[in-house]
Amino acid sequence: MKILVLNSGSSSLKYQVIDTSKGEALMRGIVDRIGMANSLLKQKRFDNDVVEVEDDIISHSVAIEKVLDLIIDKQHGVLMKINEIDAVGHRVVHGGEKFSRSVLINDKVIRAIEEYSEIAPLHNPYNLRGINAAIRALPKVPQVAVFDTAFHSSLPEEAFMFPIPYVFYEKYKIRRYGFHGTSHYYVSKRAAEILGRDINNFSVITCHLGNGASITAVKNGKSIETSLGFSTIAGLMMGTRCGDFDPAVILNIMEKEDLTIEQAVSLLTKHSGLLGVSGVSSDMREVQNAAKNGNKRAQLALKMFSYIIKKYIGSYSAVLGGADAIVFTAGIGENVPNIREWSVENLEYMGAELDKEKNNSCIGREMIVSKDESKVKIIVVPTNEELVIAEDVVKVIEEIDE
Amino acid sequence: MKVTRIGFYGIRNIGAGLVQTVVNKGLSAVVFENNSDIYHSALSIIEKNVDSEIEHWGLTSKDKKVMFSKIEHIDKFSDFAKYDIDIIVESVEEELSKKIEVATRIMSELNMNIPIILTSQTNMLKSIVDDMEGAKRTVNIHPVPSVPIYKIVELTRSLNTSEATMEIVRYFFEKLDIKPVEIEDGCGIVGPRILISTVLEACDMMRDSNIQPSDFDLIMKRGLKMYKGPLTMADEIGLDNIKIWIEELSKKDSSVYKVPQIIIDLIGKGHTGIKAGKGFLKYK
């Protein structure tokens, strides 16, 4: 099947056309600065044909029309006719407690996604814009919603509840939802395949380390604990997001610096993490360079980044009753050997022994980087969220056909 | 509906805050202001506000760079024709005659069928556009400056304002993440009238009981849960503008609205508020 995968943000639209029979992307692209002057569309085809278009793209509807035009463009396209698209898969960030798996989009699903906009105001409304625009542009093509939270719907109650008055869960559904679900699902499944293990008898800790980052404990194919919570700023230290720390600190800073809620949110989401500690950048490469050149705060930021990952790995090993594998994925997880090394340093006691040579040689590719005798395997698995979305779309369509 | 580039006729009065709000949300601003000093003074107000937001963690230096790249200056009115603007916002002095002059010029000389947003704090929309041909494209607004970046705006339509205009204007505010509160046309809308009344009371109290401006603002902030003290807000708006607002309101009711001596004295010393580094309060 040919699946169009869409990831719609507030002013951007990422897309891929995936041929699920080969498991490959035929093209991928992004429309940036939607609704602003000088929007930019960048697209790369499987054969490295690149196209860039600058235009005023005033809405997600116009963006999708442009994307569809390019998909069937004689020079840069990959399809002859638009009706070759069998279905559209939409990444939807929040599926709340209602969606534990991907679903065919209908009015009821749209209303539910709208409802969850209240707890995901920065994501769901924009995901919906993409959905509505795609339905208008391709009214006869099935549209499927794939939720970032769905994989974590298996979290047990003691893991998803917060130790605050229960009434807030009842009134506002405040609880841990977890995110990056498609990535954790894909790499945990792939790790089991690489090791020749049955996913239903396999415990793995998956570390998704990108600009946003999270760790998940996956037991027998199900997420049982995850570091992102109600929002996307919990858990690990990230590029500009703080991760976990004493909640009294922010209240204290708000009072001392006379901050509004918006300013406090911006402090935690845009000024913290690697950027906040190093004062250099939110980009791991720039922080690494500064650290190499002797910048003490950059060195501290890197130490903290890895130390917090290690703390989570230890804690999730306890949650799992011991892990069979630790997986690193996403930009930093796939490409930064020293962060992987520091994150598993001194974990030999739990059976995780890194092969430094293998680890240093592994950049952006699938590889086992632990010693052969390591009881807990350490694996690098490049993530592929779009492929998971496309495969889920196929599953949903096939179920309907049956 | 395309709303990506906003034209500004002038950048006086509350113009700087509006331009800041527009570019903060990723839209572009094309500003016609033929007085270079006024334009640069407004830019420096925006810069001070943005720097303060950075200092208070609300924005980043990168945000600042992007915001300023979205402001374009033109010094000829006819240059608007070179830009594909979607809405034009008037931001000139508060005098009624000036507002009428600008509204007339936009309607007669700008050959673009786009909404016109006026920003009179003290005059009725009807008294500005009355029976003008372009009245159907016109609304009046007042963004409430009680938060660092406007979150709420008072929006007035005339009997002639078309539903199509309202639709575009509502969409514009939705893009700015500002909630419009639609109120009936009147002499001065809620925010300015209440602010002016509070400033007048504050001036009376400073005269009678010698209370310090900083103490007055502290009581209002902590006691009445205002985000900013009213005197700080007046300093932000500019005491010269506040004086004009009071004078305009006094034309409707001179028994209530009279420019206090303390404001006349401050303006006389050049202490016009934040832009001068000193107004009711002192600024770094």
Image: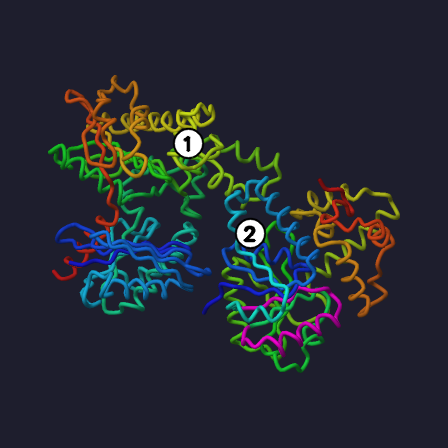
Above or below for A98 versus A285: below
Element marked by disc 2: helix
The image's colouring method is rainbow
Callout 2 and callout 1 share a chain: no
At 35% from the left and 55% from the top, the residue drawn is A8
Element marked by disc 1: helix
Q: In the picture provided, is A253 more to the left or to the right than B271?
A: left
Residue A256 % position (x, y): 62, 34
What numbered label is drawn on residue B247? none
Amino acid bearing label 2 = Phe
Q: Quadrant of the C terminus of chain B?
A: top right
Q: Quadrant of residue A308?
A: top left
Q: Quadrant of residue A312?
A: top left
Identify the residue position indicated by label 1 in the image: A287
The local crowd at label 1, few if under 14, some if 14 to 19, many if 20 or more residues have their Cα within 10 Å, is many
At 82% from the left and 62% from the top, the residue drawn is B257
How many numbered marks have been drawn onto this rendered protein structure? Answer: 2
Residue A98 % position (x, y): 31, 52
Q: In the picture provided, is A115 more to the left or to the right than A21?
A: right
Does the image show residue B126?
A: yes
Q: In the picture provided, is A70 more to the left or to the right than B132?
A: left
Q: Quadrant of the N terminus of chain B?
A: bottom left
Amino acid bearing label 1 = Val
Residue A41 % position (x, y): 35, 58
C-alpha distance separating marks 2 and 1: 27 Å
At 40% from the left and 57% from the top, the residue drawn is A125
Q: Give the residues drawn in magenta, as a range.
A: B87-114
Asked if the residues shown at circle 2 and circle 1 are in contact, with their CB atoms under 8 angstroms apart, the answer is no
Does the image show residue A392?
A: no
Viewer-nearest residue: A82 or A178: A82
Identify the residue position indicated by label 2 in the image: B68
